């Protein structure tokens, strides 16, 4: 739990701004239209952001359409005066500006802003240290909590009153839980909520204080001392209960919003500051530019620039707190050096002098500036480095299309000077995502040696549940420092420039800062990596496997483009066939890709059972269609068309475009910091998502081929997650099966079907296999019934018989969940932790999901650690024994190699042994594999 979230009722703030500046008659300098509300809105917002120092923000707006409360009470808000004519366009403009500046905004048809606010508070109450609501609506008092308070406007545009649960008790005399009962009696004239006529604030509060709630008031109506009040209450009983419904804030809206979605955008971005001027709001532009310190420029080779920590500029990135060895992962964080000396090196002679003065015994951070995010296609534009906090150097290189090229040395000339330092393993190198720099430099003939510390990997190990570990966010988190972002340097949209077209002086400040801040981050993070659980994971697994992954990415794999083009046509034909069948069963043609039209066909015209409701109607997502299988033949065709469409767009159409023009191979990128379990993921292409068992998966793998004269070898761990479960559960039946070589699926089938192992049929075995792999994911009877297409009763019996067969598994699951509840995390065999705060959630769905993750994460994570260790050892053996064969791919529990037939037997034996000995379990680890001309033949 960290960070502060500010939730703003957008309409309320706009109205307040409008009336506050109504007498000023402000107009827009560009259009001449009234602009008081717009000006006041932004002036108030910027003041709030400075005063409240929030890290996240959300704007909510009323929809402007019929509200769901109108279904309860037609006259709800019916008497409100129309919005002033000159305010309407200004609210539209505010909305447009918020969108342009990338502030998070939420408006839903039929749903009031207050309900979105209430649902945001409930959804993120445990994610933030504090939530602040900007609103004057008394209804919202009911969502206040120990870490949730309101700011209610007092006078002008800058005075606010803090409303928290204690304020409600002190000033009204009720608890926040009693707010809806209080409002039921009082009513709300602004919303036309009737309440009980003749009952005012004091009377309503007194009744609640005396009786507690509405039900008790009416149950003990005869005990009310004032007869006139009894008559009023009796006469308006129906209105009282209706009013409570109307005043109750909805807190369970299904909002597809993640914490990171609410981060405050960088409104100090020069392009965004300029936006105010472009839109004719000159005063706002001037004020914001002044706050942002724009522009900051300097002359000369060396620049002394002030770099005071500025958390307000970007907003401090808030991450879920996690305890490591009893301390917070960001405790004892540092602060950035406030004085900087950044130098752009202009000549090779100067470069030689500076490199000559560096200390080989001290770590050095290295960063490259390039033309592409793909390291295999990137052209090198410069190298920056730093060995002292606050000091950075940058050497810019020429580029054929740059107007500055005649002033700069070529990459080859500059790298000749840098090569002794870069390729010397005695120099400890530090980087942020240093695998990228390693690959870029390798393409220029430089072997970046001595790689010692990657700040991105360190951040990941400290906060594995986070998805973002970029330097800009880390600088705020660990150094309280706001960096120059890439977007600020090159611009966005139509104003975006190529990096080589920007003045090298400006690039130099950005590049030097990257190297410097990376060094400073390493100084903060390195001590944390030397602590307990992190040391082995970081230095024995993550850093070494980084080098192995770099080798794999550099090597790439060959594909047959013509084959994929043919396969794409086959998939297109299948898509058209299923489309015809869908239109036939629908009785008419329609746009299958239109959710709205599909909803109409399925749930209105074909009258299929609707399940999951979204804001736009009944869901037609994959899980819904799967649950509808068997109800109508159209469903199978819809699932098939989606499958082939995805395979076509993701693989057959895309793979040929990913072939590197220089190497003729595809070079996937592996990510170490995405999955919280420690598993690797891959992009461009995502090989993890190729179907494993389907015929289509086999067809795709056929297109991945060995280079001429070589063969593909696929080695796969056999049932590794079940073996790890046997280890953790210490289950005698399961361990005996693996130690004696018994088919584990047959043994499970015998247990759940009540037959001997030699009586197990192939159908029984297949069902038992599904049960085996479902249980380790904490499956419920509902989930298993869907997986096997059986009744929930039968699924429940299967699960019960499974646990009766493997008693140790049930015990393990109970114990790991209890451990997680006590400690807040689970861990792998090697100590990789995953923090699960939802294990304590009051919401059953969230807590149950956390329990399932608690059961499976140690297993998945241990499997991930195991294959990483195997990859490291195999890579070492390849280099030590000078094998010509190479490791190319890692996909789940499988390693794919390109093998020279001359060393086929020796290499196979070596790789298999390393995989099987990577980690010691209580049961044997088995790796199986075969050779082929393509990946499918070897699979």
Image (cartoon, rainbow, N blue to C red):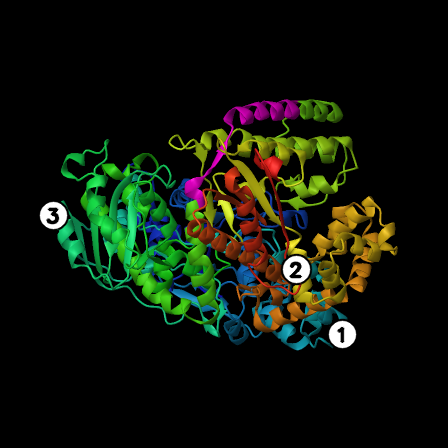
Q: Nearer the viewer, mark 1 or mark 2?
A: 2
Q: Are marks 2 and 3 in contact (CB under 8 Å)?
A: no
Question: Mark 2 or mark 1, which is nearer the start of the sequence?
Answer: 1
User: Which label belongs to residue 924?
Assistant: 2
Residue 851 pos. (x, y %): 65, 63
Q: Tell us which disc is closer to us: 2 or 3.
A: 2
The picture places residue 798, in percent across and down from the top left corner, at: 81, 56
Task: Bin the neighbour count of mark 2 within 10 Å (Cα to Cα): few under 14, some 14-19, many 20 and up.
Answer: some
> Please, what is the dominant secondary structure of the magenta stretch?
helix
Q: Quadrant of the C terminus?
A: top right
How far separated are the C-alphas under marks 1 and 2?
Answer: 77 Å
Check disc 3 and report the residue beneath it: 349
Q: Which residue is mark 1?
A: 222
Query: 526 or 43: which is nearer to us?
Result: 526
Q: Nearer the viewer, residue 339 or 314?
A: 339
Nearer-N-terminus badge (2/3): 3
Q: Is residue 646 above or below residue 880?
A: above
What crowding class fits label 3: few (fewer than 14 Cα within 10 Å), some (14-19), or many (20 or more)? Answer: few
Of badges 3 and 1, the one in the foreground is 3
Q: Which residues are drawn in magenta?
A: 552-576
What's the mark number on residue 487? Answer: none
Residue 244 in the image: state x and y as whole percent. Answer: 65, 60
Callout 2: helix, strand or loop? loop
**Residue 575 is a magenta residue:** yes
Is label 1 in a helix, a strand or a loop? helix
Q: Where is residue 261 drawn, in percent x and y?
A: 47, 51
Residue 39 is left or right of residue 239, and the answer is left
Classify residue 894 as left or right of residue 264. right
Q: CA distance from mark 2 to mark 3?
A: 61 Å
Sequence-earlier tag: 3 or 1:
1
């Amino acid at each position: 739990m960290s960070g502060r979230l500010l939730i703003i009722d957008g309409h309320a703030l706009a109205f307040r701004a409008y009336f506050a500046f109504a007498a000023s008659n402000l107009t827009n300098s560009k259009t001449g239209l009234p602009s008081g509300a717009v000006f006041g809105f932004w002036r108030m917002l910027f003041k709030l952001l400075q005063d409240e120092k929030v890290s996240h923000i959300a704007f909510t707006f009323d929809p402007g359409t019929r509200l769901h409360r109108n279904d309860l009470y037609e006259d709800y808000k019916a008497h409100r005066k129309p919005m002033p004519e000159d305010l309407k366009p200004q609210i539209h403009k505010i909305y447009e500006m918020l969108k342009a500046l990338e502030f998070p905004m939420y408006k839903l048809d039929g749903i009031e802003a207050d309900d979105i606010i209430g649902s945001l508070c409930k959804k993120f109450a445990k994610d933030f240290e504090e939530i602040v609501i900007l609103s004057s609506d008394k209804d919202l008092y009911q969502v206040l909590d120990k870490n949730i308070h309101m700011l209610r406007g007092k006078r002008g545009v800058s005075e606010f009153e803090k409303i928290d649960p204690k304020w409600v008790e002190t000033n009204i005399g009720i608890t926040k839980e009693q707010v809806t009962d209080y409002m039921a009696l009082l009513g709300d004239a602004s919303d036309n909520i009737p309440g009980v006529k003749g009952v005012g604030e004091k009377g309503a509060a007194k009744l609640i204080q005396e009786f507690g709630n509405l039900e008790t008031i009416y149950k003990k109506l005869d005990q009310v001392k004032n007869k006139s009040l009894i008559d009023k209450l009796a006469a308006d009983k129906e209105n009282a209960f209706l009013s409570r419904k109307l005043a109750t804030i909805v807190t369970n809206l299904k909002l597809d919003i993640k914490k990171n979605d609410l981060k405050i955008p960088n409104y100090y971005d020069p392009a965004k500051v300029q936006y105010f001027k472009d839109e004719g709001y000159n005063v706002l532009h001037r004020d914001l530019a002044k706050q942002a310190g724009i522009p900051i420029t300097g002359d000369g080779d060396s620049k002394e620039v002030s770099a005071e920590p500025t958390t307000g500029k970007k907003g401090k990135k808030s991450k879920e707190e996690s305890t490591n060895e009893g301390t917070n992962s960001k405790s004892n964080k540092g602060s950035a050096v406030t004085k900087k000396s950044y130098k752009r090196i202009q000549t090779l002679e100067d470069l030689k002098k500076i490199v000559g003065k560096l200390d080989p015994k001290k770590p050095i951070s290295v960063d490259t500036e390039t033309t592409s995010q793909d390291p295999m296609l990137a052209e090198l534009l410069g190298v920056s480095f730093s060995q002292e906090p606050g000091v950075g150097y940058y050497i810019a290189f020429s580029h054929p299309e740059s107007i500055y090229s005649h002033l700069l040395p070529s990459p080859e000339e500059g790298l000749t000077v840098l090569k002794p330092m870069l390729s010397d393993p005695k120099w400890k190198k530090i980087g942020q995502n240093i695998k990228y720099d390693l690959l870029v430099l390798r393409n220029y003939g430089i072997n970046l040696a001595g790689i010692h510390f990657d700040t991105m990997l360190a951040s990941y190990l400290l906060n594995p549940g986070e998805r973002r570990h970029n330097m800009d966010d880390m600088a705020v988190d660990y150094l309280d420092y706001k960096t120059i972002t890439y977007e600020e340097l090159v611009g966005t949209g139509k104003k975006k420039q190529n990096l080589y077209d920007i003045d090298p002086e400006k690039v130099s400040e950005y590049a030097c800062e990257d190297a410097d801040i990376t060094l400073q981050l390493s100084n903060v993070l390195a001590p944390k990596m030397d602590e307990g659980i992190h040391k082995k994971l970081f230095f024995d697994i993550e850093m070494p496997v980084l080098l192995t992954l770099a080798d794999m990415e550099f090597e790439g794999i060959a594909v047959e483009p013509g084959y994929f083009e043919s396969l794409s046509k086959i998939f297109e034909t299948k898509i058209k066939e299923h489309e015809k069948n869908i239109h036939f069963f629908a009785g008419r043609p329609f746009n299958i890709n239109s959710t709205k039209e599909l909803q109409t066909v399925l749930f209105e015209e074909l009258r299929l059972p609707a399940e999951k409701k979204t804001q736009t109607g009944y869901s037609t997502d994959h899980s819904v269609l799967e649950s509808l299988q068997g109800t109508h033949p159209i469903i199978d065709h819809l699932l098939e068309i989606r499958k082939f469409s995805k395979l076509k767009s993701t693989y057959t159409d895309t793979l040929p475009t990913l072939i590197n023009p220089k190497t003729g191979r595809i070079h996937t990128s592996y990510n170490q910091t995405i999955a919280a379990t420690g598993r690797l993921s891959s992009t461009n292409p995502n090989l993890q998502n190729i179907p494993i068992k389907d015929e289509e998966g086999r067809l795709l793998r056929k297109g991945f081929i060995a280079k001429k004269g070589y063969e593909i070898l696929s080695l796969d761990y056999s049932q590794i997650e079940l073996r790890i479960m046997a280890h953790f559960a210490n289950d005698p039946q399961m361990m005996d099966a693996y130690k004696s070589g018994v088919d584990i699926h047959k043994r499970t089938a015998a247990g759940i079907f009540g037959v001997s192992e030699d009586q197990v049929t192939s159908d029984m075995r297949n069902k038992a296999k599904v049960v085996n792999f479902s249980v380790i994911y904490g499956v419920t009877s509902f989930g298993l019934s869907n997986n096997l297409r059986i009744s929930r009763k039968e699924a429940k019996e299967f699960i019960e018989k499974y646990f009766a067969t493997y008693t140790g598994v049930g015990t393990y699951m109970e114990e790991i969940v209890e451990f997680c509840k006590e400690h807040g995390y689970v861990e792998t065999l090697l100590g990789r932790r995953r923090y699960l705060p939802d294990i304590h959630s009051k919401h059953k769905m969230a807590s149950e999901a956390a329990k399932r993750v608690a059961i499976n994460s140690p297993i998945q994570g241990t499997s991930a650690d195991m294959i990483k260790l195997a990859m490291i050892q195999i890579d070492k053996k390849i280099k030590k024994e000078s094998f010509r064969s190479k490791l190319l791919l890692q996909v789940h529990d499988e390693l794919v190699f390109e093998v020279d037939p001359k060393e086929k037997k020796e290499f196979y034996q070596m790789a298999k042994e390393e995989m099987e000995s990577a980690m010691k379990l209580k049961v044997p680890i088995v790796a199986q594999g075969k050779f082929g001309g393509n990946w499918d033949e070897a699979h």
